Image: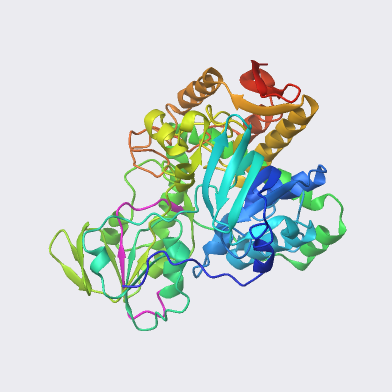
Amino acid sequence: MTSILEPAHSGGTTRSRAAEDASGGSRRHLRVAVIGSGFSGLGMAVRMLQQGIDDFLVFERADEVGGTWRDNSYPGAACDVMSHLYSFSFAQNPGWKSTFGKQRELYDYLRDTADRFGVRPYIRFGHELLAARWDEAGRRWHIETSRGDYTAQVLVSGTGYLSEPSVPDIPGLGDFRGTVFHSSRWRHDHDLTGRNVAVIGTGASAIQFVPEIQPVVGRLDVYQRTPPWIGPKNDKATTAVQSWLLHRVPGYQNFRRNFNMWGREVLAFVMKRPAVALKMQKMASDHLKKSVPDEELRRRLTPDYVMACKRLLFSNTWYPAIQQPNVDLVTDPIDHVRPHSIVTADGTERPVDTIVLGTGFKAVDRPVAARITGRDGRVLRDVWRARGMAAHRGTTVAGFPNLFLLLGPNTTLGHSSQVVMIEAQIGYVLDALKLMTKRRLASVEVRQEAQDAWNERLQARLEGTVWNAGNCRSWYLDEHGRNPSIWPTYTWRFRRQTRRFDLSEYRLATTVGAGLPALSDA
């Protein structure tokens, strides 16, 4: 069996820069170290340069920027948020080809952003974070990467929550003798023409790549655990008039972006109330009824939970593909995998030579947390396992001074663009850096009581929402049924609550003379 998680290959770049600091003698000290160069890390780098902060490096384990949109290169990969909103407000692109950006277009946009804003000299490609340990005496982070060690006053994690593939624990999967890979590690060198292919999972990725591979495979078995609610996707090509307006009329693109952003806030109102969501559910239900005339198949494709309890998906091609003669929708659970077949709980054995895992990501068990050690030797993963994954304003964690998480706990949106949340958090971090300079602070650490109060209010707001009361099990929830993922209200509230870095919520350390830092509360 070939490796399930082989690194996604991206076109190449500046690995020569990656070895510059690692080959030197003394360990380089930075003001800010950023992990990851997707939307979060790249946005953080651009905004720091715009604020005159240039004592930083971005550590990227791959050989190019792009994060999710670099790795998820599977056939049909695309966004389901309007491109004008799913892009930086400070790096707008008038050249979007259609309403919703495709993978290659988004990937090119991020690479262009890195070039346009001069970020590349600050990126160290091929530098995977192995460990980051807080030094209490020195008030700094000791950072170990696969290509060298560094220290930094501030550590910003931009690894997000859709970066580590989730591989199901299916008996016999390791003994499979064919080819198996995760959708985010697509094997473009593996020709699917005429093959017997099994797709495990029917989430956001599968509904995009299944219609693309269906016409070329010999046989396609799609293993569904729970069906998703799917609405029609109103994707339209950019017209010549729209292109002219976007390129020629100042402020037009910003208007389109803001109009879409505020319009989507209505969905937050709907999703907070399951009764209202049930009424909107008719849109998806009508789409299913119109697309699938076979009553039995339609029954198997109909979810038994309230719309948006799981992520609401959009596609015009999924239902037509699933009804093709060479496709079988399998709803019986998988019992085990054999070297050349998959056996379901009812005893049916189906031959297969390629398995594609559309099984999502480790969203509530983030691997980067195992590599970050804070004050008193506490590992972030262990703290979260003991207390539940939580942060203050989705960004800082008690016991981990000078650590900032972009797209941290409870910043996932079910109704709008994650870029809106990322930009709000970047502003919060920038304000922290400004105050640390102004007050000559060596470190800031959120007080446990401030973090607890924030999360108590947040979890109370989640009660009664469609995400918690939708009669379904989603990746938003952890093993205890707690929701450490979703931001349960409007984005304008999050933007307002991260507009200012409130020092009164933090323990502060100031450097006194040449001695050790002195701790205090603001």
Left or right of 341 on screen, residue 487? right
Asked where in the image residue 509 lies, by quadrant, the reply is: top right
Tell me, yes or no, if residue 89 can be seen here.
no
Taking the magenta stretch, the answer to whether it contains residue 448 is no
Residue that appears at 47% across and 33% down: 377
Asked where in the image residue 52 lies, by quadrant, the reply is: top right
Left or right of 344 on screen, residue 494? right
Q: Main secondary structure of the magenta part?
A: loop
Taking the magenta stretch, the answer to whether it contains residue 218 is yes
- In front of the other: 382 or 313: 382
Image quarter (top left, top right, bottom left or bottom right) of the C terminus: top right
Left or right of 140 on screen, residue 368? left
For the record, the magenta segment spans: 214-230
In the rendered image, residue 16, in percent from the top left (x then y), is placed at 67, 68
In the rendered image, residue 324, in percent from the top left (x then y), is placed at 35, 73
Above or below, 137 against 206 in this view is above
Residue that appears at 76% across and 23% down: 513
In the rendered image, residue 155, in percent from the top left (x then y), is placed at 62, 41
- In front of the other: 509 or 149: 149
Image quarter (top left, top right, bottom left or bottom right) of the N terminus: bottom left
The colour scheme used here is rainbow
Residue that appears at 23% across and 68% down: 175
